[in-house]
């Protein structure tokens, strides 16, 4: 049995796939790794590149071709096919920290938790800037309950993302999760639904994922988030619908916290990026009220920030201007008057 399955959803990824794959293929780890490339209906050389690696690393790299189903559809296929003890998804235009893999694999050998958290870093291809995203447990390598995590949410929220999570494969399969297809931002579903049911979470003091940012073509760019704001709304609604079905407890609290984070991204786009300010405020109000009806306590935590964003919209303040305000004395005064979390 393989120890770790890397699932790589790939769509027209010829410019990136070789770097992604090469970062994982350490000779001393080949027997312990399963690398699954899901070619999601690419029209470029993605399949040829993947086949070349399959031929070079038989028994380690394998290719699954499918019609285009979107990022979520590729994850559904790849995660269902994973046979390693743990699975971790790496997008084809990102890569892993090769020097960290031996320690990561060794830690997974003795780990039995449903969820394993690792640090990750972003690398801005436009500016070269690197930024580390960490979790801060009391002790690394020690299994915790989801309740423990939620009691110190601010120490863990940066790692409880698509980039920071690895799942025990049997646990993930048991969840029967089907991610939304033909839609962007469904990675929030991947980082939310299984974790709501996790019995144990182990944080590791290891950097694994390198997340490439700074590309205007990426889904996280302002222009694309605005163009696909309906996708964010659809994923947010699914988080809310599934989250409110959960009984009171850590799982429900986790779903609410993850939905709260996505709501803030939606509000930022609607109020600070959307050029039609009236339309943006209308979209924001609908989303905010929907969230408030499902999770009123979480809404109270961000109500002050929402009011400030509304005021900025009326003043035609952009996201870039807002980011400049973050470092100003004005922002400090505002935070003293409102509840921020």
Image (spheres, grey):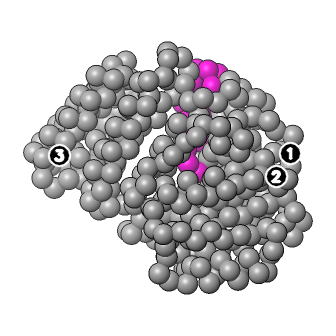
Q: Is residue 91 magenta?
A: no
Q: Which quadrant is the C terminus positioned in? A: top left
Q: Secondary structure at mark 1?
A: helix
278 in relation to 46, above or below: above
- Residue 264, numbered label: none
Above or below, 57 against 296 in this view is below
Q: Residues within 10 Å of mark 1 (few under 14, many from 20)?
A: few
Q: Nearer the viewer, residue 229 or 140?
A: 229
Residue that label 1 marks: 109
Label 3 sits on a secondary structure element that is helix
Q: Nearer the viewer, residue 328 or 83?
A: 83
Residue 166 in the image, given as x and y percentages of width and height: 67, 46
Above or below, 330 relative to 190: above
- SS at mark 2 in the image: loop
Lower position in the chain sequence, tag 2 or tag 1: 2
Residue bearing the label numbered 2: 3
The residue under label 3 is: 280
Q: Nearer the viewer, residue 1 or 138?
A: 1
> Given the current orientation, which residue lies at the most extreme left position?
278
Q: Position of residue 259 (x, y in %)?
A: 41, 34
Q: Which residues are magenta?
A: 146-163
């Amino acid at each position: 049995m393989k120890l770790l399955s890397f699932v790589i959803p790939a769509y027209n990824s010829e410019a990136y796939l070789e770097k992604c794959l090469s970062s994982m293929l350490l000779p001393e780890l080949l027997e312990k790794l399963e690398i699954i490339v899901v070619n999601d209906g690419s029209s470029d050389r993605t399949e040829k590149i993947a086949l070349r690696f399959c031929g070079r690393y038989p028994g380690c790299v394998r290719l699954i071709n499918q019609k285009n189903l979107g990022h979520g559809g590729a994850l559904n296929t790849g995660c269902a096919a994973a046979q390693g003890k743990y699975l971790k998804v790496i997008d084809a235009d990102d890569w892993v920290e090769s020097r960290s893999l031996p320690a990561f694999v060794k830690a997974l050998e003795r780990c039995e938790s449903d969820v394993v958290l690792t640090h990750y870093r972003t690398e801005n291809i436009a500016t070269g800037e690197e930024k580390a995203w960490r979790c801060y447990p009391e002790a690394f390598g020690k299994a915790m309950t989801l309740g423990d995590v939620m009691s110190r949410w601010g120490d863990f929220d940066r790692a409880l993302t698509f980039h920071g999570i690895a799942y025990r494969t049997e646990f993930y399969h048991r969840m029967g999760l089907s991610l939304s297809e033909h839609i962007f931002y469904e990675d929030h579903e991947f980082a939310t639904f299984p974790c709501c049911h996790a019995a144990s979470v182990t944080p590791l003091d290891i950097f694994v994922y390198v997340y490439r940012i700074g590309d205007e073509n990426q889904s996280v760019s302002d222009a694309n988030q605005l163009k696909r704001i309906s996708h964010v709304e659809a994923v947010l609604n699914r988080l809310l619908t599934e989250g409110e079905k959960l009984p009171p407890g850590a799982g429900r609290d986790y779903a609410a916290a993850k939905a709260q984070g996505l709501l803030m991204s939606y509000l930022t786009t609607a109020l600070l990026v959307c050029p039609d300010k009236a339309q943006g405020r209308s979209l924001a109000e609908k989303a905010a009220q929907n969230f408030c009806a499902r999770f009123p306590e979480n809404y109270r935590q961000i109500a002050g920030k929402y009011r400030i964003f509304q005021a900025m919209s009326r003043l035609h303040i952009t996201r870039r201007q807002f980011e400049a305000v973050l470092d100003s004395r004005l922002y400090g005064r505002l935070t003293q008057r409102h509840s921020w979390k």
